[in-house]
Image: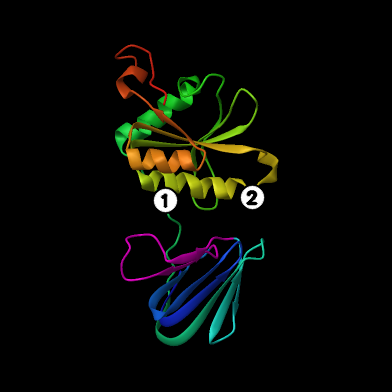
């Protein structure tokens, strides 16, 4: 991973155009080619980014990042404060807590509990940015990417979005839709998920384990 702290300005050109005026920011270049530009605030979300795959042309005082769609991110470097590279090694990935991991196992064994006609293709379906919890096909044969959480929050919806973006790069999968599954989904997360066309499913964990009636609440 390369970390550059620089006084820079940034211009995006693609489906729309956007400009970040000159300021000191962190530029992160990951091993897979993903480029993200961060300010000293705003939690985890970058100000602008370009997901891999892409190409990076380092022209000294400016970089041009281009993706397969022809979108470009031009980073003009006015002053470099720090420039360092770090080898992080292989990451074991996020380890879910006991309830969340068990919930995923139970849903993999009974995908029809989330939707009639749903059948499992694979648990932990691999992508370049991490595994999709469950990859299924619905009654019409369409691929359904499912993110499973104990508590459904906005970051889980964003995670599902990133996975679906990666899955769309594989044309053999055909049409893909998303499903966000949790014991409880926060209202803000539900609004975001549904605005992106994802189905939200709330699951009763105890019922799924057979400790209560079998009905699952679908919303």
Q: Is residue 140 left or right of residue 83?
A: right
Q: Residue at x 30, y 20 (%)?
A: 206
Q: Residue at x 44, y 62 (%)?
A: 89
Q: Residue at x 44, y 48 (%)?
A: 158
Q: Give the left or right position of residue 156, taking residue 11 as reference.
A: left
Residue found farthest to the top = 213
Image position of 92 with respect to 119: above or below: below
Dot 1 falls on a residue whose secondary structure is loop
Percent coordinates x, y for residue 40 in the rendering: 31, 71
* Marks 1/2: CA–CA distance: 24 Å
Which x, y percent locates residue 109? 47, 22
- The spot of residue 197 in percent (x, y) is 52, 39
* The quarter of the displayed image where residue 97 is located: top left
Q: Is residue 63 above or below residue 128?
A: below
> Which residues, given as a range, are shown in magenta?
32-52
Near mark 1 (Cα within 10 A), the count class, few <14, some 14-19 or many ≥20, is few
Quadrant of the rendering where the C terminus is positioned? top left
Work out whether residue 113 can be spotted.
yes
Label at residue 196 = none
The residue carrying pointer 2 sits among few (fewer than 14), some (14 to 19) or many (20 or more) residues within 10 Å by Cα, namely few
In this rendering, the answer to whether 86 lies above or below 32 is below
Percent from the top left, x then y, of residue 38? 39, 69
Q: Main secondary structure of the magenta part?
A: loop
Is 213 on the left or on the right of 119, as rendered?
A: left
Confirm whether the magenta stretch covers residue 167.
no
The numbered mark at residue 92 is 1
Q: Which residue is mark 2?
A: 169
Please state which of the two labelled residues, at mark 1 or mark 2, is closer to the viewer: 2
């Amino acid at each position: 991973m390369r970390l550059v702290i620089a006084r820079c300005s940034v211009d995006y050109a693609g489906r729309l155009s956007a400009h970040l005026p000159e300021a000191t920011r962190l530029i992160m270049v990951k091993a897979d080619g993903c480029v993200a530009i961060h300010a000293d605030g705003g939690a985890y979300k970058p100000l602008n980014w370009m997901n891999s795959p892409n190409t990076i042309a380092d022209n000294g005082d400016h970089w041009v990042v281009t993706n397969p769609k022809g979108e470009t991110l031009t980073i003009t470097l006015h002053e470099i404060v720090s420039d360092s590279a770090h080898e992080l090694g292989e990451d074991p990935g996020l380890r879910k807590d006991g309830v969340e991991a068990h919930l995923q196992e139970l849903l993999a064994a009974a995908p029809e509990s989330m939707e009639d006609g749903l059948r499992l293709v694979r648990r932990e379906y691999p992508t370049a940015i991490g595994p999709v919890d469950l990859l299924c096909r619905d009654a019409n044969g369409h691929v359904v990417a499912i993110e499973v959480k104990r508590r459904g929050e906005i970051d889980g919806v964003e995670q599902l979005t990133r996975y679906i973006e990666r899955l769309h790069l594989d044309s053999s999968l055909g049409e893909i839709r998303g499903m966000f599954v949790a014991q409880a989904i926060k209202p803000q997360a539900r609004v975001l998920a549904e605005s992106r066309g994802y189905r939200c499913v709330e699951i009763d964990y105890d019922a799924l384990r057979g400790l209560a009636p079998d009905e699952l609440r679908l919303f």
